[in-house]
Image: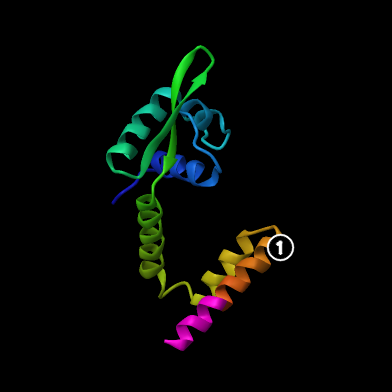
Amino acid sequence: MKLNPRELEILRILHSSDKALTSTQIVKSGEANGLTQSTAQVVLRKLIAAELIEVRGITHSGNVLSRTFGVTEKSKEVLTKRFLESFRNYRSIISVRDAVEGMLNVEENTDIRAERIKQIETVLQEVKGK
């Protein structure tokens, strides 16, 4: 499934949030540079049709009712597949070591980085056991 930059940005915002968001909250998140309300509405409809997000509820936003949106499990699967396809395409250029080191270095919080290292160690032990 091909996703354009706006769709990826909205998915990233929704995956990063611990709660469902309205379209206004998505636009005002500050992370979606240049995203307008009308563009957000179009992208949200497309993501709903693709079953990558879902309406989680309805809330009051000022004087109007607004839908809140959250990601589906399918969106995580699609993004994971996209990530792995990118790695597959560049694995002759980027070594596993560089990829893993780069992923760990993206995280600036040392506690979270340490947790990620533990997760990788667990995965490695599981793979070795197979």
Up the image or down, 40 lies above or below 76; here it is above
Q: How many marks?
A: 1
In the image, what residue occupies the spot 52% across and 34% down?
33
| Residue 15 horizontal/vertical position (percent) | 49, 46
Q: Residue furthest bottom?
A: 129
| Residue 104 horizontal/vertical position (percent) | 61, 66
Query: Considering depth in this image, is 68 or 32 the residue closer to the camera?
Result: 68
Residue under label 1, please give it. Answer: 111
Left or right, 100 with respect to 50, comes to right
Which secondary structure type mostly characterizes the magenta part of the structure? helix
| Residue 30 horizontal/vertical position (percent) | 58, 33
Query: Considering depth in this image, is 110 or 31 the residue closer to the camera?
Result: 110
Left or right, 116 with respect to 8, comes to right
Left or right, 5 with respect to 16, comes to left
| Residue 6 horizontal/vertical position (percent) | 41, 38
In the image, what residue occupies the spot 30% across and 49% down?
2
Left or right, 105 with respect to 126, comes to right
Quadrant of the image for the C terminus? bottom left
Bounds of the magenta span? 122-130
